[in-house]
Image (cartoon, helix red, strand yellow):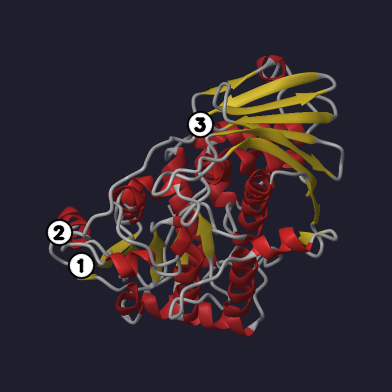
Amino acid sequence: MTVYPNRRQFVQGAAATAMCGYWADQVKSAPATKPDNKIERLGIGAIGLRYQGTVITLQARQYGDVVALADVDRHVREQARASFGSTPRIFEDYQELLNLDNVDVVLIGSPDHWHVKMAIDACRAGKDVYLEKPISLTIDEGKTLRRVANKTGRVIQVGSWQRSDARFRLAVEMVRAGRIGKLKKVTCATGKNPTGGPFAERKPPGNLNWDLWLGPAPKVPYLEERCHYTFRWWYEYAGGKITDWGAHDIDIAQWAINDYPLHVNMKGELPKIKNGYNVASKFAGSIQYSNGVELIVKDTGRAGVLFEGDEGRIFVNRGTLAGAPVDQLEDHPLDRDAFKLYDYDNFERQQRVGKLDAITNHMGNFFDCVQSRRTPISDFESQHRSATTCHLANLSLRLGRPLTWNPQSESFENDAEANQWLAREQRKGFEIA
């Protein structure tokens, strides 16, 4: 059974990690000392409680105590508190939550345009972070978060939980083990973006702090359809299905490809409706990697990831793992010790014996890494790289032409126009730095 630290050991361990110059991809520190018999559970603060924010908080409370909640919508934060009893304190401004000494870890389920700002503020406040996917709104935001995470030594787990699902991980391990020969092509079908508008401008409801909801994004009149779940279909706050589902499926594809993108060529249609959804109404295209693999991203087809090699194919989604190489596993088992993608014994053991479902394991892995100061399975570096590929696809779409990417400099080759899109202007008072 996993043993979690009391607050004294937690703080001491975090301080020691920071002093040693923690580097998330390389650290192999020893497990924390076992705590006293009487364990003080870690304090959890949750920011952004609509939809997935409440889901991840419910998952996390088996590992700690929910002590504080923050949401700019009064109805949402009050309903969330009702889900966790009367104990948690509630706030409109997440900065007040970060100031609490009894908050040890922070869960962030806010809209995408707030992800990096909130994560950086949490890291600088000395909190470890579970951050919903996608990790960033822009490529430069991801680079800034990387810098802050490395400097502060905080643990960051991104909610791309398919990495914790046995089907997806086995599919990637089989590809890396050569079970379909040399990998040639991967296809991800993300589904279509909704279309809609024009929508009516209205006065913000009294329960919602609209200015604080917008945060770093441009100041615009309130539209009900910009807010809550449908923020995903506005480029000011998200990237549509390419980032929403790409943060899952493109991440799995890139985990198997194990290389960096070089050339991106996406085509599609962008709606031009005032006060209407503005992510692509149609899209399809390809991304070329330096090892020769081609990644197809499209909005039609069976949802999931199809791997094609010169000796076979494997298809995987949340309910399926299929293909001749999968059928052959019983007679020709995979050497998991040689090809497994995550090397921490406790997490591997939980996966093998099926103690917990995939999503819960993803949260459990986060709390394990908070204790041990090890790298989570969806660490900020891998997720920054996966989100970068999603952003590249969207940028090619919006610019209407192919792009050439330099993965070392993380910039476009001889393309000043495209490089201007690596970042976006942020409103005064909400800057990310």
Would residue 386 appear left or right of 50 to someone viewing this image? right
First in sequence: mark 3 or mark 2?
2
Tag nearer the camera, 1 or 3: 3
Q: Measuring 33% from the left and 69% from the top, which residue is drawn there? A: 212
Name the spot of residue 353 as percent of width and height, x first: 50, 35
What is the CA distance from the residue labelled 3 to the residue labelled 2? 39 Å
**Residue 21 at x, y = what percent?**
67, 80
Instruction: Please report contact status of discs 3 and 2: CB closer than 8 Å, yes or no.
Output: no
Badge 1 vs badge 2, beta-carbon distance below 8 Å:
yes
The residue at 71%/16% (across/down) is 328
Residue 403 screen position, x and y as percent: 78, 49
Q: Is residue 400 above or below residue 283?
A: below
Q: Which residue is mark 3?
A: 192
The circle drawn on residue 259 is none
Judge left or right: residue 111 versus residue 244. Answer: left
Percent coordinates x, y for residue 195 in the rendering: 43, 35
Per the image, the residue denoted by label 2 is: 85
**Disc 1, disc 3: CB below 8 Å?**
no
Q: How far is mark 1 from mark 3, CA to CA?
A: 39 Å
Identity, as a three-letter code, of the amino acid under mark 2 = Gly
- Residue type pointed to by label 1: Pro
Foreground mark, 3 or 2? 3
